[in-house]
Amino acid sequence: MILRHSSLEGLLSTLSTGARVYVPAKADGVTKFVLYSSSVRPDFSITNTTMPPKDLLFPQTQHMYRYGTDAEGVPYVEPVHDADDVIVFGMRPCDVRSIECMDDVFLTKGFVDVSYQAKRERLLMVAMACTAPAPTCFCNSMGLCPTAAPLADILLRPAGATDASGDTAYLVEAQSEKGQAALAQWESYKATDTSDADFEPVSAAVSCSLKVSMVGVKDKLEAMFDHPIWEQLSKKCITCGTCTFVCPTCHCFDISQENRLSEGTRFRCWDSCMFTAYTEMAGGHNPRASKSARVRQRFMHKLCFFEQRYGKTLCVGCGRCVEKCPVALDITCLIDQIGAADVAY
Amino acid sequence: MSHIEIEHGCARSVEGRDALMPLPCRVLAVSQETSDVKALRITSLQGTRPFDAKPGQTAMLSIIPSGECMFCVSSQGEDYLEFTVKKVGFVTEQLHALRPGDAVGLRGPYGNWFPYEGLRGKDLLFIGGGIGMAPLRSLITYLFDCRSEYGAIDLVYSGSTPDDLVFCREIQEDWPRIDGVTVHLSVYRESPGWDGEVAFTAPFLERLGYAPDGRIAVLCGGPSLFRTCLASLEKLGFAPEDIITTLEMRMKCGIGKCGRCNIGSHYICLDGPVFSIAELHKIPGALH
């Protein structure tokens, strides 16, 4: 199916009658996935939104259940259900890959996270292939391709201009049964005066200019837990946690509560392994009291521990942390330094 | 010689239940064990045991409006699960204020368990300090329930003062009367009314001179007791495979998702808390 850029607005407005549709746009001073409405201007030229779409499955703050005591003095706990049909329209391949990592965490190993699962089952991922990776993008080095997103339900690949007015054409393909079924709603917006064969979609040759070698990094890190490199690498870190909040794969959370009179709500919210209190135990013992221990934890988890546990790296090469870190603690430089480090320390 | 197998990642969510939602429960009984330790028995709103837990498994106990803390189930009965709570912070202070009949929240069970099947027929040496008795007690009381299936049970248990020995009366008076059970107690400093041993746990353990002889050691205590007693056990000739311990770390979810109890490729809440020392040697940072 060929879809013209000029038909997108009509399509989005149709889709938003049956689901909550999120599109890349600028809101509240940052770019993120915003709930579509007629007043929202989607911007598909944004390579990566500042905030990743992970909050659609794993909200920054999420109510889990209400509790209180009834008139007879009997305590109760009531779940708060809030899963809706959600379409994320215009996810980049790296963000789609990040959902694969989140699925591993929240849906496997003996315990399913009920709230994540409910949202995940009602999520339709519409991916947009990248034509111009940002200077901070390095997804190729993480084993991804900027123009492919295998887990997405539907993939849109820009395929050049369709006419003299410069209206971009997208080649649309369903990649799952769910995506196939969803395309029925798209039919009336497809370009009827042309066919798929007339277009050459953006090619697999699109590649990130920033490159890093992951060869042997996990194995090397296994022997580097006590390496002096962590002390040196962590020196400039100010433990602000920005990297963890903009990261599409960071999934650590805290559980807390708010109370009003005799009723209350327990919620979870994003947390960061960069914070001192994150591992501080009652009684004061803290297994990761030093900054270098926390920096080591973050990078070991991403580049070594997660792969040992789930068979993939917990980094998708989106470059958000590279762009946003206030002290330029760049993960790609860190990987290079690990690659160059002498393990006979 | 074959070593004891400890299962990891064997915890599963209870069918049809959201693993992060607590069951509303009530306090059945409270006993003051030391000046800052209480044992709380928790029962369901129907007066039954809230769920089954294997020795060594943990659960998240909460004063629902105040917060949750992870504890080892220290023992269990027909209609209750027992938790041994030391007053060290905000939530535990409120747990200490509870009275029978008060509402609490409870979710679990989480984590793996002591290899009670594999330990059958073995002689066991328990080494504990202070509140470290809580998880050991879950296994010890289990062994007492099927006493004939296990070999000799020796306990070396210490506290800073006699007041830091949890379940002291029971351990001093009842346990030594059980067939094949030997109890050695010590405190770290001279205390009024104490005419027993005054020694740190590690030198005390070495002086008692336990030889491995097919014995399995089960160790639980604070960081310095853990470090020194581990060195002593190794000095006495215990192989790392034959020393079992249970770890602690800050936890929020209990199901291997929230991230904070991550060590190496493991989550203590889900894959642990029970590990052998041989296994911990292979996990970076676990024995730091």
Image (spheres, coloured by chain):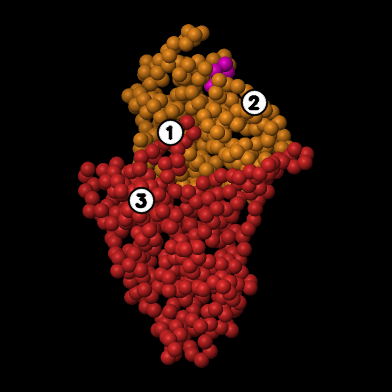
Chain colours: A red, B orange
Residue A209 x/y as whole percent: 30, 69
User: Which chain does tag 2 point to?
Assistant: B
Q: Nearer the viewer, mark 1 or mark 2?
A: 1
Q: Main secondary structure of the magenta part?
A: helix
What amino acid does circle 1 point to?
His
Q: Are marks 1 and 2 on the same chain?
A: no
Query: Which residue appears at 37% of the width and 41% of the height?
Result: B283
User: Which chain does tag 3 point to?
Assistant: A
What amino acid does circle 2 point to?
Val
Label 3 crowding class (10 Å Cα cut-off): few <14, some 14-19, many 20+? some
Query: Which residue appears at 57% of the width and 16% of the height?
Result: B169
Q: Which residue is mark 1?
A: A285
Q: Which residue is mark 2?
A: B30
Kindly identify which numbered label has been placed on residue A299: 3
Q: Secondary structure at mark 1?
A: loop
- Separation of marks 1 and 3 at Cα, in angstroms: 23 Å
In the rendered image of this protein, does residue A222 appear above or below residue B123? below
Task: Tell me where the magenta segment starts and ends, as one range.
Answer: B166-170
Image quarter hosting the C terminus of chain A: top left
Q: Secondary structure at mark 2?
A: strand
